[in-house]
Structures are given as C-alpha cells and as structure tokens.
Image: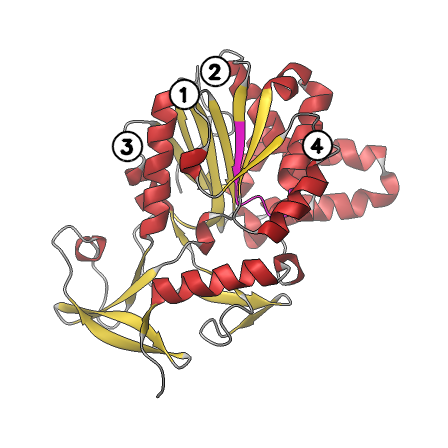
C-alpha cells in the first residue's frame, strides 16, 4: 500500500474541490431544479410569502448556497417578477459559490431573470447584513464527513489510503455525537462538522438581521448509522475512493443534528420533500402547466411525481426551515411534522 493515509473529510474536500473546478457536475447527476421549473417556481412563491411575513423589507438579501447552474434562482426570480414584482425589485441576489466555472453558468442563467446585480461569495460570512432569505438545495450533502467505526467499547476512524479505507484508533471527547448513539458493533457513524458549523453560523446571521432559510437535501431525521458515502459518474454509482476529482462525493444529511445546531431560532421540520412541495401547491402548478401545454402534459406530471412521490425523491429528500422574525407559520410546514 502506497501513499500516506488521509482522513476521510480531508480526502472528500480535496476530491470535491477538484471535481467542481474541472468538471460539469450536471453531466453526472440531476437535481430538482433541473428536473422541472416547478421546483424553483414553488420556492420563489415561498420567498414571496416569507418576504410578506417579514414586513416586506426593501431591500433584502435573497441568497442561495450551492446554486449549481443558477436554474433554481432563475426560476424563482421569474416567478417573483410575474406575481410579486415588489418582492422581485427589493431582492438583492447573493450566491455562495466558489467555482469560477459555475459562477459563469449562474451569471448566464440570471441575466434574463433580474435587472439587479448578482453578487458572488465564497462563504456565508461575507453576505451583507439586513433582512435575509436563503435557499440551499443539495448543498449540505457535498460537505466533507468523517466516519467512525465502533469496535467493542472503542472507536476507530476511517482514513483513505491507495483507494481503500484504513482504520486508526480514535479517542473521542465525551461530547462527541458518536458516544450518544447506540451504534452496533462494527457499524459506521458519520459526522459532518462543516454542516453543523454552517447551520450554526446561519442561525446567528438570522438572529442579527431576521429572515428565513430552507435547507433541502437527501438524508434522515432520526439517529442513524451506516456508510452513506457515494459517488456518481454519468448517472451511475462508482467507487467514491477511486479517481478523486472525477466524481461528486456526497453523503446523507443528518437533519436532526443540524436542527440542534440551529439553537435560538425557530426550527421547522425537517419534513419530507413530497409533503413540503404538496403544501406549496405542486399539484395545482403541475395541472396549470399541463393545461397550458397539453402536448407536454405527460412529461409535466412525470416530473411532479419524480419530485414528490415517496418512491422517488419525495421521501428520501427532506426540508428543514429556520426563521427569525417571521409572522405566523413558515410556509410549507403548516400541519406537517418530522416523520
């Protein structure tokens, strides 16, 4: 075996940085905004309602973390321009994106969707102060994880060496999340400190300026264990430890831990994506589009099913809401509970 062992989170961060700098991720996988315009439109409607619940601040920061090609934000802004022009005019668009190549894609997508300048940031910390609404779809799953394996009363941590896992004994502090879960012998527990740090910083940002955030991703809402690290290339699973930088590495998101990290703000969910989109009116919007374009009706209904059906994206994908200063219930969460 050659090369020095590299901690899994360091390996994952290095591989994903190389991947997003040099490859087109949408040749390898498809996200909800790319499946149908309905996804971005519904989130645009969500923004409009939340903006009203915040007292219609003008201006306000409309941010997206991990905006991909810019499709979600473009669809949301077009919806706002059509049905909530005052909200559209007040929105100052800020995108958290480190890839120069993806920034160029986002700029092209947003040129026709807003006359306001679009601003890019490497991190949440540099966003301007003030009232704030943030969207993050499939952002957290790509943040680097660590994996720990239970052996009797002790733990080992997984490192990567020469394309395979190797284990090194780990001494965990008393507050480590691994020690609070009854993980079976030989099983893997994943932790993602960058996700917790992001949500904690997001909560502090909301406390300072009031606003709301949506975090949408695939994952789980109850204590769980197991190895969820995965990689896709051309839509097919590949070995995540081979050829770093050639595939997107992701892992399931621990929504319960993120909710705990968002202390001192109102936390909504997490709830299943299918329930959330249904509450926002996915069925009605699909019907409206199908009537307007009857030759595309089957494709429109198929896209709605893909987004919301339990056997497709509706159950595995979940939605977590955070808010400060929002009057009433956060849209999409009324009557829903974590399941």
* Mark 3: secondary structure: loop
User: Which stretch is magenta?
Assistant: 62-70
Tell whether label 2 touches label 1 (CB within 8 Å). Answer: yes
* Mark 1: secondary structure: loop
Q: Which residue is mark 3?
A: 263
Q: Which residue is mark 4?
A: 285
Relative image position of residue 197 (x, y in whole percent)? 32, 44
Comparing marks 3 and 4, which lies closer to the viewer? Answer: 3
Which disc, if any, is residue 54? 2
- Of labels 3 and 2, earlier in sequence is 2
Question: Position of 217 compared to 161: left or right?
Answer: right
Considering the image in quadrants, where does the N terminus appear?
bottom left
Considering the image in quadrants, where does the C terminus appear?
top left
* Mark 4: secondary structure: helix
Comparing marks 1 and 3, which lies closer to the viewer? Answer: 1
Above or below 332: residue 218: below
- Of labels 4 and 2, earlier in sequence is 2
Nearer to us in this view, 325 or 268 = 325
Q: Is residue 123 visible?
A: yes
Question: Position of 268 compared to 58: left or right?
Answer: left
Q: Which residue is mark 1?
A: 210
């Amino acid at each position: 075996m050659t090369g020095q062992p590299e901690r899994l989170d360091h390996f994952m961060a290095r591989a994903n940085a190389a991947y997003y700098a040099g490859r087109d991720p949408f040749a390898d996988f498809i996200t909800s905004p790319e499946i149908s315009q309905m996804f971005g439109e519904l989130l645009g409607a969500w923004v409009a309602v939340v903006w009203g619940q915040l007292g219609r601040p003008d201006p306000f920061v409309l941010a997206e973390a991990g905006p991909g090609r810019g499709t979600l934000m473009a669809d949301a802004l077009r919806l706002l321009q059509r049905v909530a022009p005052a909200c559209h005019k007040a929105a100052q668009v800020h995108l958290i994106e480190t890839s120069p190549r993806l920034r160029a894609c986002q700029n092209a997508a947003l040129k026709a969707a807003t006359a306001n300048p679009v601003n890019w940031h490497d991190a949440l910390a540099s966003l301007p102060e003030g009232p704030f609404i943030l969207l993050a779809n499939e952002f957290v799953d790509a943040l680097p994880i660590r994996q720990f394996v239970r052996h009797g009363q002790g733990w080992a941590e997984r490192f990567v060496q020469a394309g395979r896992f190797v284990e090194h004994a780990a001494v965990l502090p008393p507050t480590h999340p691994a020690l609070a879960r009854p993980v079976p012998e030989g099983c893997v527990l994943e932790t993602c400190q960058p996700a917790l740090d992001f949500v904690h910083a997001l909560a502090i940002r909301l406390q300072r300026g009031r606003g709301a955030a949506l975090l949408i991703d695939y994952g789980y809402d109850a204590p769980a264990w197991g190895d969820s690290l995965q990689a896709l290339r051309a839509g097919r699973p590949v070995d995540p430890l081979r050829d770093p930088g050639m595939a997107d590495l992701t892992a399931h998101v621990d929504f319960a831990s993120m909710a705990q990290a968002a202390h001192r703000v109102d936390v909504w969910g997490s709830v299943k994506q299918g329930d959330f989109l249904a509450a926002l009116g996915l069925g009605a919007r699909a019907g409206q589009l199908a009537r307007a374009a009857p030759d595309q009706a089957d494709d429109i209904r198929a896209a709605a099913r893909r987004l919301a059906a339990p056997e497709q994206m509706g159950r595995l994908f979940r939605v977590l809401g955070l808010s400060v200063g929002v009057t009433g219930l956060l849209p999409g969460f009324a009557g829903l509970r974590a399941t």
